[in-house]
Image (cartoon, rainbow, N blue to C red):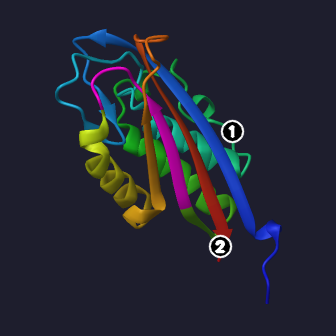
Amino acid sequence: MMRGMDDVRIGFGEDAHRLAAGRPLVLGGVAIAEAERGAVAHSDGDALLHAIADALLSAWALGDIGHHFPDTDPAHAGLDSSAIVARARAAVAGAAPSARLSQVSAVVTLDRPKLGPHRTAIAEALAALLGLPANRVGLTFKTSEGLAPDHVQARATVLFRAA
């Protein structure tokens, strides 16, 4: 039996944070130790996980992380973004129990430091968090070419298939 397009859902998410000295930089759950600046945010500022959480939620029209984790709520201060992704996954499971995450593709824009040396660690951390094999996690790293050197930005697309 051939499956139709109704068996596929695609979600997109995007997040950005200003960078400041004295803050840790975490991307995809991986601390980037050599970063001189990190994300200014209410949570831990992991722009990559925030983009992925928004993509998961958007695939099923479940709102966004600002709705689920408002930055006006002190309970979310310093929150580990893996908890945000876990809650987004739980929301999807509640809305579509037969849906299976098939792939995630993400782009991170950051001028410094270069992220290439962290590609494997970030892909493996994302795969573990999302329950995917590492070859189903696509990562692209870009710089802003000096246009926006004081921020980190991430965009993510997810693909779901019905079981």
Span shown in magenta: 103-114
Left or right side of 33 for 11:
right
Q: Secondary structure at mark 2?
A: loop
Query: What is the quadrant of the N terminus in the image?
Result: bottom right
Coordinates of residue 46 in the picture (x, y in percent): 39, 32
Q: Residue at x 59, y 53 (%)?
A: 158
Quarter of the image where the C terminus is located: bottom right
Where disc 1 sits, the SS reads loop
Q: Which residue lies most toward the bottom here?
A: 1
* Residue 63: mark: 1
Left or right: residue 116 versus residue 62 is: left
- Please indicate whether residue 8 sits to the left or right of residue 141 in the image: right
Q: Nearer the viewer, residue 116 or 132?
A: 116
Residue identified by numbered label 2: 98
The quarter of the picture where residue 162 lies is bottom right
- Within 10 Å of the Cα at label 2, are there few (<14), some (14-19), or many (20+) other Cα atoms? few
Residue at the location (49% across, 10% down)?
A: 147
